[in-house]
Image (tube, rainbow, N blue to C red):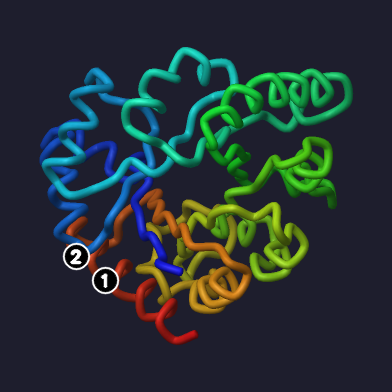
Amino acid sequence: MKEKFGVQLYSVREEIKTKGFPAMLKVIKEAGYDCVEFAGFYDYSPEEVAELLKENGLTGISAHIGIDAIEAQLPYIDKIGIKYVYIPWRTYEELCGDKMTEFIEKIKHVKKLLDQRGIVFGYHNHAHEFSNGGDKVYELISAVDGFTSELDIFWAVAEGKSPVELMKKYGKALSAVHIKDMDKRTKTEAREYPNAIVGEGKCDCENVVKLAKQMGIDLFVLEVEGFPCDVSEYLKKSCDNMKKFAAEN
């Protein structure tokens, strides 16, 4: 099994604004990654995005797309060859009662369109899904056959959860892991400090990567809320550490 290491492009949103999308693809490739996860397409056409990826030796493996926007984004999904689509956000209120039922029906509708394309479909968590002692992610993946989780370990830790235990709980419904480490100085707000370099913080990234490999997960996506050092340095060191952890199995 060949692991794939990517960057969620939200991480370099400010750099894309100042340096441009093509320039940041080059930086990501040079740091050692082989794929990216989209969070928007920066006003480029599907054909332009596909060509830029090809020029930089990257694949557009996954995308964060709101449930109500997925159908409209199918031309991008098809042309780029995106293999995983994740719903990036839902408020806590939208994950409760009748609103949860409505959301699940939307998931089932969109899933049919993605199933036809052989695309893995799932949900990306923040912290609030685990509030009040619950686990809204588990409710979703239990309610829709074949629906999956892209576990963001940073937000799980922010809510006092063990990423390793959540991974075991989700089992085969876990399709990818968002690797995002938390500064060890953080006491209250999750964004109190910039992110630690992967493997140097509170999120037990080493054991997360090792367990994911054992579970058959091969997609690891770096996401960064805030950089503590030069972006290129951070991306390279984090990529090197993720690959090292994966190789230790």
- Say which element carries label 2: helix
Question: Is residue 187 rendered to the left or right of residue 227?
Answer: right
**x, y percent for residue 92:** 73, 32
Q: Callout 1 environment at 10 Å: few (<14), some (14 to 19), or many (20+)?
A: some
Residue projecting furthest to the right: 97
Residue type beneath disc 2: Glu
Q: Residue 87 occupies which quadrant of the picture? A: top right
- Say which element carries label 1: helix
The residue beneath circle 2 is 233
In the image, residue 80 sits, relative to residue 191, either above or below, namely above
- Front one among 9 and 249: 249
**x, y percent for residue 231:** 21, 56
Residue type beneath disc 1: Lys
Q: Residue at x 20, y 39 (%)?
A: 53
In the image, residue 50 sits, relative to residue 189, either above or below, namely above
Residue projecting furthest to the bottom: 248
Q: Callout 2 environment at 10 Å: few (<14), some (14 to 19), or many (20+)?
A: some
Q: Residue at x 78, y 48 (%)?
A: 138
The answer to the question of whether label 1 and label 2 lie on touching residues, with beta carbons closer than 8 A, is yes
In the image, residue 14 sits, relative to residue 179, either above or below, namely above
Q: Residue 160 occupies which quadrant of the picture? A: bottom right
Question: Is residue 104 rendered to the left or right of residue 245?
Answer: right
Q: Residue 62 occupies which quadrant of the picture? A: top left
- Front one among 132 and 35: 35
The residue beneath circle 1 is 237
What's the distance in space between the residues labelled 1 and 2, CA to CA? 6 Å
